Amino acid sequence: MKTAITGNMELIDRLNSDVEKEREEATAEAIAFVQEQSL
């Protein structure tokens, strides 16, 4: 799981973005990523 976190630092930055649209897109990506990992 450590690589998943370090590999997604950019995604984490976007989740913390001040831009709402950017946050929403990053959230959708994060959810898709987690779902892929759990298959």
Image: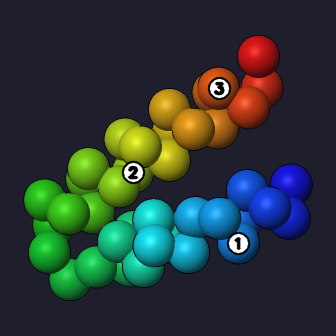
Q: Amino acid at mark 2?
A: Thr
Q: Is residue 28 above or below residue 27?
A: above
Q: Which label sits in the foreground, 3 or 2?
A: 3
Q: In percent of the image, x 37 and y 41: which residue is there?
A: 28
Residue 28 horizontal side relative to residue 7, left or right:
left
- Residue named by callout 2: 27
Q: Amino acid at mark 1?
A: Thr
- Residue named by callout 3: 36
Which image quadrant is residue 37 in?
top right
Q: Is residue 31 above or below residue 3?
A: above
Which image quadrant is residue 19 in?
bottom left
- First-in-chain label (3 vs 2): 2
Q: Is residue 37 above or below residue 27?
A: above
Q: Which type of secondary structure does the marked residue at label 3 adopt?
A: helix
Please state which of residues 17 and 2 is positioned toward the viewer in this rendering. Answer: 2
The answer for how far apart the CA atoms under marks 3 and 1 are is: 17 Å
Q: Which label sits in the foreground, 1 or 2?
A: 1
Q: Residues within 10 Å of mark 2 (few under 14, many from 20)?
A: some
Q: Residues within 10 Å of mark 3 (few under 14, many from 20)?
A: few
Residue 20 horizontal side relative to residue 24, left or right:
left
Q: Position of residue 23 (x, y in %)?
A: 27, 63
Q: Amino acid at mark 3?
A: Glu
Q: Which type of secondary structure does the marked residue at label 1 adopt?
A: helix
- Residue named by callout 1: 6
Q: Residues within 10 Å of mark 1 (few under 14, many from 20)?
A: few
